[in-house]
Image (cartoon, helix red, strand yellow):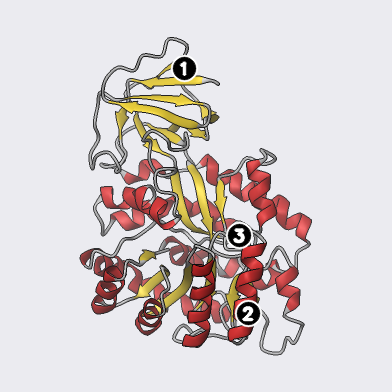
Amino acid sequence: MSLTLFRNFRLLDPAVADELVEGYELLIEGDKVKELSDKPIKASKATVVNCGKRTMMPGLVDCHVHVIATMVNIGQNALVPDALIAYRAARIMKGMLDRGFTTVRDLGGATYPLVEAQEQGLIEAPRLIIPGKALSQTGGHGDSRSRYDRRDPETWTRSLGSLGRLADGVDAVRQACREEIKQGAHFIKIMANGGVASPNDPIHFLGYSREEILAAVEEASNAGTYVAAHLYTDEAIRRAVECGVHSLEHCNLIQPKTAKFAAEKGAIACPTLVTYEYLGVEGPSLGLDPISVAKVDTVRLAGMKSLEIMHKAKLTMAYGSDLLGEMHRHQSEEFVIRGRVLPAIEVIRSATMHAATLCKREGKIGTLKAGAYADAILVDGNPLKDLSLLTNQGAHMALIMQGGRMHKNQLS
């Protein structure tokens, strides 16, 4: 089994320390971290890599992506042939890996064959964690049909390009959860609030009854996993947490009492501010319908305040981008946006240790401690002083390693 020894770097791993530390060495064996030590590592058979005092970090983790969202208009995306969606998704995922994201959590749409394609080395892509299709009530955020579109909802269930599927009523929700888990879902996603990129549900709409949410939570729990919910309003967030939802997506309109309540219940939030920055600017030219464009400012303007509220409440936040179509290229700019409000170390925690916790992969991703996957990036400079070093399509990353394999290596 191959051995690689990295030396002469500054370590930035929030699971080890909240600041850059020097004097560490990193030994990779196969696809795992064999040893991370602040003392010289003896490995005579290892290939030694001099990192030139660059910053060594764990591979980044984005906890809210849609890898099959190849178009901004997700209703039209659902009508694209599956084979074309798969090829487009492979290109989107390679772009994510090029930016240093070695693991991503899809929040609706990706199916298990894409997971297998990555695991089998058929595509260059981040490790993929999925819920299968997101569950939505008729007329909810996962229903992309226009007002007068009466096509069979099963059209969306069967289409790779569809982010979601419809399930109405407790029994239907239970069956949908069981089907997604049987087909390889790692967790369950539900649409529990109105949304931007859907035609018939204003932001304030509540998605699903309490009984339906409770059914999804029970089914996920029975399978040893959890429910993630699309949420914006304070009322919807509070209700979801009361029902046992663990992963709170977006949360733009959350208020202090609810943020504190969610923290006490052990929930984790996943804000996604970068998508609203660009939906309003680029969305119309990329096919976002006028109804959706009009909704953007409702959540965009409250987003920065939500970060302050959740940080003050000590509600754990993971990193998320939630971009669609051609806007995937802005994925890393979430770092800079959050850095306007939050300490840089907290932003980096969101894409490493907090992301690992949300993905239930603690000790495996988001860290360089022994036993973790050998996912690492080498950054030119100090991201704690300049988060933009993590942007620009990986331009400041001299090395990107995933599972012990060099995806990018510009070291001389």
Tell me the kind of residue under disc 2.
Answer: Asp
Q: Residue at x 44, y 58 (%)?
A: 320
In the rendered image, which quarter is residue 223 located in?
bottom right
Q: CA distance from mark 2 to mark 1?
A: 51 Å
Tell me the kind of residue under disc 3.
Answer: Gly
Is 350 on the left-hand or right-hand side of 322? left
Is 135 on the left-hand or right-hand side of 353? right
The residue that mark 1 highlights is 412
In the image, is residue 32 above or below residue 126? above
Q: Nearer the viewer, mark 2 or mark 1?
A: 2
Callout 1 secondary element = loop
In the image, is residue 33 above or below residue 246? above
The residue that mark 3 highlights is 325
Residues under numbered marks 2 and 1 in contact, where contact means CB atoms less than 8 Å apart: no
Q: Which mark is residue 143?
A: 2
The front one of 93 and 273 is 93
Q: CA distance from mark 1 to mark 3?
A: 35 Å
Query: Tag 1 or tag 2, which sits nearer the N-term?
Result: 2
The front one of 66 and 168 is 168
Tell me the kind of residue under disc 1.
Answer: Ser
Instruction: State the image coordinates of residue 336 (x, y, percent, origin top left).
Output: 35, 52
Q: Residue at x 75, y 64 (%)?
A: 80
In the image, is residue 362 above or below residue 210? above
Q: CA distance from mark 3 to mark 2?
A: 18 Å
In this orientation, does residue 374 appear? yes
Q: Residue furthest front?
A: 222
Callout 3 secondary element = helix
Query: Tag 2 or tag 3, which sits nearer the N-term?
Result: 2
Q: Residue at x 26, y 70 (%)?
A: 264
